[in-house]
Image (tube, helix red, strand yellow):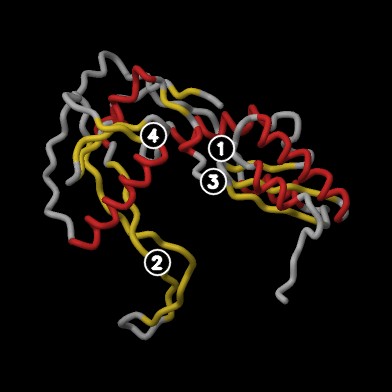
Amino acid sequence: MAKWVLALEGQGKPQAFQRTSKKAEPQNERVVKKEVIKWLDAGIIFPISNSNWISPVQCVPKKVGMNVVQNENNELISTRTITGWQICMDYKKLNKTTQKDHFPLSFIDQMLDRLAGRSHYCFLDGYSGYNQISIAPEDREKTSFTCPYGVYAFRRMTFGISNAPAIFQRCMMTIFTDMVEDIIEVFMDDFSVLGYSFDDCHKNLKRVLKRFVETNLGCEELKKKLVTAPIIVAPD
């Protein structure tokens, strides 16, 4: 996989960002603790001391799906359903000093046009996509964050960094460059495998998953389950 280098604008001097947020609610502190432990166990973050780059951690609502509610004017409006909380780093000040990567993301309408005419589709959602890209050792300190349980830095790319979407899209387009717009469409960590028939889609899916394994995207077990009959198992 690719290695991410965090290039800074001008002199890009490091700054320690004071933690000015209010004390987190107990339930949010539990969310932070759970995520920090998970990242430590997976080797995604590591404890760091004497870092000149410190950003605060924050909890944000995890919104999944849509719901229709009635507002104060008796009008029906759509709202996102909150299913829990997730943590992210407030990298606003770091992002201001980061050189911007202008690699383009795919246009959804153009992707939909290319999907038209195919009869079978298979959709894959990458697992912890950003975390699969390693950060250059000399740049890891810049991702340092503080929380009630200490100061940590990332070994792997994370959400909140301004260039993360462009870097990830470039990586995916490079990996699947000979397949894009032919048998697969790629938008970030969402993959659409296309086929003119079930057998054609199945053949293309095997090619895509083989590429996942070859590039160490961690889909070996998924590959075994998806290309071994029966493909679909009905209840009971």
**Mark 2 or 1, closer to the camera:** 2
**Mark 2 or 4, closer to the camera:** 2
> Could you tell me which quadrant the C terminus lies in?
bottom right
Mark 1, other Cα within 10 Å: few <14 / some 14–19 / many ≥20: some
Residue highlighted by disc 3: 127
**Residue drawn at x 49%, y 66% as measured from the top left:** 65
**Residue drawn at x 88%, y 52% as measured from the top left:** 199
**Residue drawn at x 13%, y 41% as measured from the top left:** 19
Rendering coords of residue 87 (x, y %): 32, 50
User: Which one is in front, 198 or 65?
Assistant: 198
Residue highlighted by disc 4: 162
Q: Amino acid at mark 3?
A: Tyr
Q: Please report whichever mark, 4 or 1, sits nearer to the chain's N-terminal start.
A: 1
Q: Using the image, determine if residue 187 lies above or below residue 231.
A: above
Quarter of the image for residue 139 reads: top left
**Mark 3 or 2, closer to the camera:** 3
Q: Please report whichever mark, 2 or 4, sits nearer to the chain's N-terminal start.
A: 2
